Amino acid sequence: MSASLHEWNLAPREAMALQSQLATQLEMSDRLAPVTHIAGVDIGFEDGGETTRAAVVVLKWDPATAPELSVVEQVVNREPTRMPYIPGLLSFREIPAALGAFEKLSVLPELVMVDGQGIAHPRRLGVAAHLGLWLDLPTIGIAKSRLYGKHAEVGEQRGDWTPLYAGKETIGAVLRSRAKVKPVFVSPGHRITLETSLTWVMQCLGRTKLPEPTRLADRLASRRDQRK
DNA sequence: GCGACAG
DNA sequence: ATCTTGTCGC
């Protein structure tokens, strides 16, 4: 059985109120155990959207070989899709299936990278932040596009980044993870700072746009991946 | 009222 | 996210 279902079947109005409340519980400072394993999380859909497929990939962290990291475990969890995609309420659609995938894991990571926003969200509770609270693990959000916040143009060089702002508050960073490619949006979720988030993301960056954890989870969650 | 809008 | 082939470029 997964987490108390009542939290996941809320009307948009209530879901939004819950997000604001939960956001106050986020820890915005570093509280990480020594990192030996990093997980990547992403969600995909099948059957025209009727089935939600959560994928979690656990990689062994080894500074000697990074950004090449070995896969220690891969898990896929399928569940009936419970609600449609509503901008700002993504976590209510994706987290239930993700929690099921984590329950199947035999190796728990000390750090989790999620495909989506951390606190770079209207109410500061993107999917990465929400998942971090549920798992009580440090999480980082790595999104392929912007949901919320303003920013200046980002440099062209790989590694260049510029702050993502919500007024005067810094809620994330726009990172040029690969030259000549659209930048990614990095924002801390839970138990980690933006600075530390950027350090980890860059350390897991190969020559690709996405860091290894989410790149592999992306592939595993995608319908194009013919595995089963 | 008019846009914007993670996956 | 997903529906979908080939094709341009490093």
Image (cartoon, coloured by chain):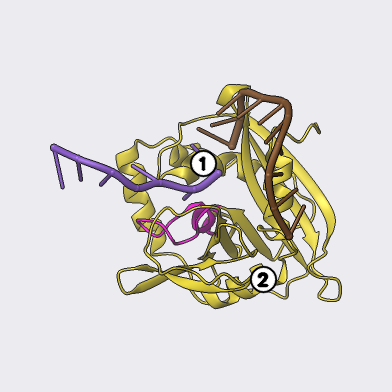
Chain colours: A yellow, B purple, C brown
Q: Position of residue A3 (x, y in %)?
A: 56, 43
Residue A114 is inside the magenta segment: no
Q: Which mark is residue A202?
A: 2
Give the amino acid at mark 2.
Answer: Met
Q: For the residues marked 2 and 1, what is the alpha-carbon distance in whole angstroms?
A: 35 Å
The residue shown at (79%, 51%) is A106
Range drawn in magenta: A116-133
- Does label 2 or label 1 sit earlier along the sequence? 1
Q: Position of residue A91 (x, y in %)?
A: 49, 46
Find residue A192 and report its image quarter.
bottom right
The residue shown at (61%, 39%) is A97
The residue shown at (51%, 41%) is A4
Direction from residue A173 to residue A181 in the image, left or right: right
Q: Position of residue A175 (x, y in %)?
A: 55, 67
Within 10 angstroms of label 1, few (less than 14), some, or many (20 or more) residues?
A: few
The quarter of the rendered structure image containing the C terminus of chain A is top right
Residue named by callout 1: A4
Give the amino acid at mark 1.
Answer: Ser
